[in-house]
Amino acid sequence: MFHILNSGMTLQGLNHSSIDFYNYSDKFSVHETKDGSISLRSSNFNELFHSFSGAKKESLEKYINPSELSRFRKKGIVTVLDVCLGMGYNSASLIETLKNEKVYLNLWALEIDKNPLNIALENANFRSNWSTNTIKILNKILKHNTFNNELINAEILWGDARKSINKIPKDIKFDLIYLDPFSPQKCPCLWSEEFLTKLSNKLNDNGWLITYSRAAAIRTSLKNSGLDIKTIIPRDNYKAWSNGTLAFKNNDYESQENKIKLWSNLSKMEEDHLKTLAAIPYRDPSGKSTQPEIISRRNIEQSKSNLKPTSLWKRQWLHTKGY
């Protein structure tokens, strides 16, 4: 059972380059996920914000836990970029985790639409997941685009992330970047090699980029931007072969929390995935391309490539492993 919460015209093709954010419209339906937390479905993208396994669970397992935030205790501060703030799960989880770690959070966020966060904050289910202080901070960010106290400095830039990322001061580099858009096929503009390179360039020397995506195209682009990549290990889903990707410039952090492996080198299966047509990147050289243009450009490049068909990889690995 779900309810339409916000009405608006669906934008066919989703041409971000022509969207005036203040005239941008979408409609969202609320869905309860298996861990009891809520998610939204976007009419524009025809996709849920989170997996049905759990919205809050996904935030913790795919972003917060792999970040190993306790390593910032000594430094006392962490600078984070949340790409696609959405309903605010990743940022809220950060705020509460770092408060317990007594680490100051310098948070930047990019988001095109205020409605998902507004809907979340008006929902009792969502609010019940967080402390009163965290809800207060999210409300301030929504209304004033900024918040500052003794534990956090937060800034959000509204609009097309391909443009708003350029508004972040050049001297700000990130310890962590959380990349959480809709899936590459639905929102390729935020998965293009050009955009991923911009994100990579915003990492500090020991910065990590973390994303739920395990797609070969995304991993290839991250490698092409000069990052090393790891796979995020699934904890309780034997059918999953990865929970996402961790990418970094220089990893001088060896010990993992509680000696539990949260991420590891790519498996042979995952390495082989990068040798298939699925590894052809999404390209957006102008930073203004529409979803159909980016998909068409990739299809043409795939048709001319000598890489092996992804179907062969699936038959070799996924079918035999039972994924």
Image (cartoon, rainbow, N blue to C red):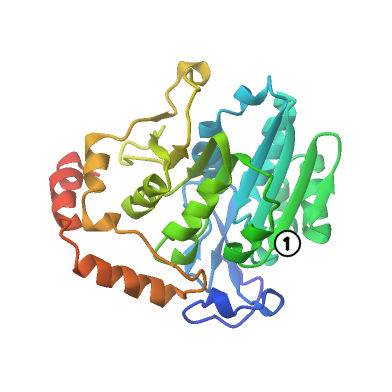
Q: Residue 41's spot in the image, x, y percent?
A: 54, 65
Q: Secondary structure at mark 1?
A: helix
Q: Is residue 150 left or right of residue 298?
A: right
Q: What residue is disc 1 on?
A: 118
Q: Is residue 25 left or right of residue 267?
A: right
Please rate how many residues cluster around mark 1, counting C-alpha atoms within 10 Å: few if below 14, some from 14 to 19, many from 20: some
Question: Can you say whether 274 is above or below 97 in the image?
Answer: below
User: Which of these two is toward me, 213 or 226?
Assistant: 226
Judged left or right of residue 323, residue 111 is right
Q: Residue at x 17, y 56 (%)?
A: 307
Q: Residue furthest front?
A: 171
Viewer can see residue 33:
no
Horizontal and vertical percent for residue 183?
44, 59
**Image quadrant occupied by the N terminus:** bottom right
Residue under the image location 58 percent in, 39 percent down? 176
Give above or below for 65 relative to 116. above
Residue 60 location (% of width, % of height) = 55, 38
Q: Residue furthest right?
A: 149
Above or below 265: residue 193: below
Q: Nearer the viewer, residue 15 or 141?
A: 15
In percent of the image, x 26 and y 48: which residue is there? 274
Can you tell which quarter of the image residue 65 is in?
top right
Label count reads: 1
Residue 271 shown left or right of residue 11 in the figure: left
31 or 204: nearer the eye? 204
| Any part of residue 83 in sight | yes
Q: Measuring 56% from the left and 76% from the top, which residue is drawn there? A: 17
In the rendered view, tell whether residue 105 sits above or below residue 19.
above
Amino acid under disc 1: Asn
Report x, y in % for residue 200. 51, 47
Q: Quadrant of the C terminus?
A: top left
